[in-house]
Image: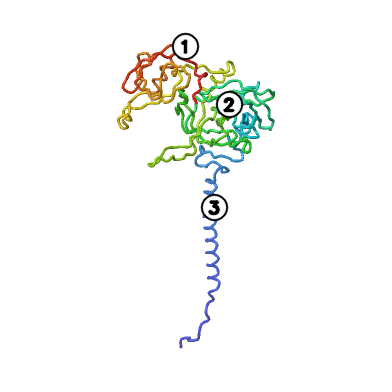
Amino acid sequence: MEPNNAPQPRKSQFWPLFTTAICSALVGVLIACLILSIFFKGYGDTAGPSASPHPENPSQTTINLDKYENPAVAVAQKCMDTVVYIEVTQVSAIGKYAGREQVSGTGSGVIISAEGHIVTNNHVVDGAKSIYVTLNDGTRMKASLIGVDSSSDLAVVKIEKSGLHVAEMGSSASLNVGEMAIAIGNPFGSQLGNSQSVGYISALNREINTDGVTISYIQTDAAINPGNSGGGLFNAKGELIGINTLKSRISGYDQYGNAISSEGIGFAIPIDYARGIIDDLIQHGKISRPGIGIVVYTVSPEDAEINGLRAGVVVDRVVVGGPASQAGVKAQDIILQVDGQDVTDNDAFLAAIKSKSIGDQVTLKIQREDAQLELSVTIGDMSEMSYE
């Protein structure tokens, strides 16, 4: 039989190819869905406050911002009404305004009693003819001066008004570096009245000597500007922990002696230290501290050798008419001993004077050029001396 050489009909390839394409597409979709589900699941787990705890780690929690209250907002709501704006006036002696009272300075204060006592800085009200207080609601009234203490830079004034919001006292003794610190005051006057700045406690026990008194200040990076003086430094609970008083504008000097400006360095008087002074000012109108009316600084042996000076406690200024001035102490005298006890630095000298009582007699052994002298000085009351 002859082989059949007639052409055979070709089988169709359409349906196998179509079936393969459909299966591949379905597999691709399934893989894509699996990848996307894993991605979005992981994204949701790390998205932040609104996410749920990880199932594999039930102890891990997240923050729900919808339920979280910013402590700075709470402090503003609690404390803003306890801080006041202070204006002081003096009698002008210039031109057509001579004899008239004019606003000569502004600052801040904190209401510390329902009776209307307000604590502020002494330098805010120093030399004032009149003092005016403006509450956060805009009420403005005249205040009376209760007492001042230049050494601590604290003062108390009083207004006659009921229904005042009083600051809650905290404690500065338990503060830690890194805690939130919130300053409320009136930077640059009434135009920026009752502003709040938020920062942290930068350091504690920063010792600064002013008029012969060394105070350990709270250092904060919460913005403190002119006008904030006398305002409150609060913690995250809205408790008063300090009275704002200083801002350092100079952080050092360059190689050419030019001042290097600084920001974020402010100081506040710790409330634990301030409370005793405030109470005495309310009770007695002043603070009595032993002093002899001089400002001193220390020249270390190293500095003395480098600069060709004498080492020791050097008298920088003498209060005119003060006890030391009356006894014959002069600027640039070097104090060697107090009542026979050697004093080699500022702290030792101040400690020796603080240990005395007002009215006591002390003997100072001093070096004046090439001569040594002994001078008898009567301890006086620092509140009655002007260190300006």
Q: Secondary structure at mark 2?
A: loop
Is residue 195 left or right of 355 when viewed as pictured? right
**Residue hosting label 3:** 37
Tell which circle, 2 or 1, labels the residue nearer the N-terminal end: 2
**Residue hosting label 2:** 127
Q: CA distance from mark 2 to mark 1?
A: 28 Å
The residue carrying pointer 1 sits among few (fewer than 14), some (14 to 19) or many (20 or more) residues within 10 Å by Cα, namely few
Occupied quadrant, residue 62:
top right
Residue at point 65%, 26% (across, down): 165
Q: Is residue 272 above or below residue 261?
A: above
Q: Amino acid at mark 1?
A: Gly
User: Residue furthest toward the front?
Assistant: 95
Occupied quadrant, residue 160:
top right
Decide which of 375, 148 is in the foreground and name it: 375
Residue 359: mark in rendering = 1
Q: CA distance from mark 3 to mark 2?
A: 74 Å
CB within 8 Å, label 2 to label 1 = no
Residue at point 46%, 86% (across, down): 3
Is residue 203 left or right of 338 when viewed as pictured? right
CB within 8 Å, label 3 to label 2 = no
Q: Secondary structure at mark 3?
A: helix
Occupied quadrant, residue 101:
top right
